[in-house]
Amino acid sequence: MGVQKVGRGMLESASTLSESSRVCAPSRFPQACHQCVGQAECLLGGLSPETQRRLEGAVRERGFKRHETLSSQGRQAEVLRVIKVGLVVLSQRGQDALPRPIAVLGRGATLGKHGLLGEADPFEAVAMSAGRVCEIAAATATALRAQDPRFDELLLRSHLQGLGQMVEWAHIARMPAVFDRVISTLLLFGQLQQ
């Protein structure tokens, strides 16, 4: 509970600064994947330059607003989304139907991976700040899996990275001292923004 309070307070003040119309505006100069500065953190950035060029028309960069739902629990994603800028909270509804925060994800995190396997998303993803994502249709990404075996490896790495972040958040939530939770939360938020 301490992590939630700190997270909300920090994000309330941070979101006021980050929610500018420029962040959510359509990109005036859409970038191709092979020209993007976020390639190192991006699932699509690990593909060969040739494959990236073939995907140019299929990848769309767009802005999102604070509190926007980017993924819904129980629904199969039609789009694979890679967070380029911003923070997103993952939550899961239990048997009591109340959403429980699990983790906060940032730059490079991929949403909608379960849809590539024909499964519903087990989490809801809601934007904590304004930001940007790159999107590719799940059908296109599924076809890419058949064409480029490297894509499956990149998906697995992305999945393992997401699991690692969830473990870090679970560790913070179980720290007995509030001060330790606050410091660890701030450090993790800093890592997510790099």
Image (spheres, rainbow, N blue to C red):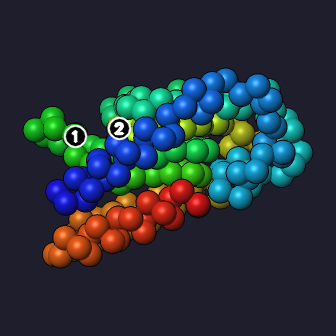
Q: Which residue is mark 1?
A: 99
- Secondary structure type for disc 1: strand
| Contact? badges 2 and 1 (CB < 8 Å) | yes
Residue 167 seen = no
Q: CA distance from mark 2 to mark 1?
A: 8 Å
Q: Residue type at mark 2?
A: Glu
**Residue 124: assigned label:** 2
Please give the name of the residue rendered at 67% of the width and 23% of the height, measured from the top-left corner: 26
Q: Of residues 124 and 21, which is closer to you in this image?
A: 21
Residue 102 position, x and y percent, is 30, 53
Left or right of 14: which side holds 157?
Answer: right
* Residue 76 spot, x, y in % from top left: 43, 30
Along the line of sight, the residue nearer the viewer: 109 or 88: 88
Q: Earlier in the sequence, mark 2 or mark 1?
A: 1
User: Residue drawn at (54%, 38%), measured in percent from left and top?
Assistant: 131
**Is residue 55 found left or right of 176 in the rendered image?**
right
Residue found at x 87% / y 49%: 49
At mark 2, the secondary structure is strand
Residue 39: image location, x then y, percent: 73, 52
At label 1, the amino acid type is Pro
Work out which quarter of the rendered image holds the N terminus and state it. Answer: bottom left
The answer to whether residue 158 is above or below residue 181 is: above
Q: Position of residue 45 (x, y in %)?
A: 74, 51
> Is disc 2 surrounded by few (<14), some (14 to 19) or many (20+) residues within 10 Å?
many
- Numbered label attached to residue 136: none
Residue 71, image quadrant: top left
Q: Which quarter of the figure has residue 89?
A: top left
Disc 1: CA contacts within 10 A as few (<14), some (14-19) or many (>=20): some
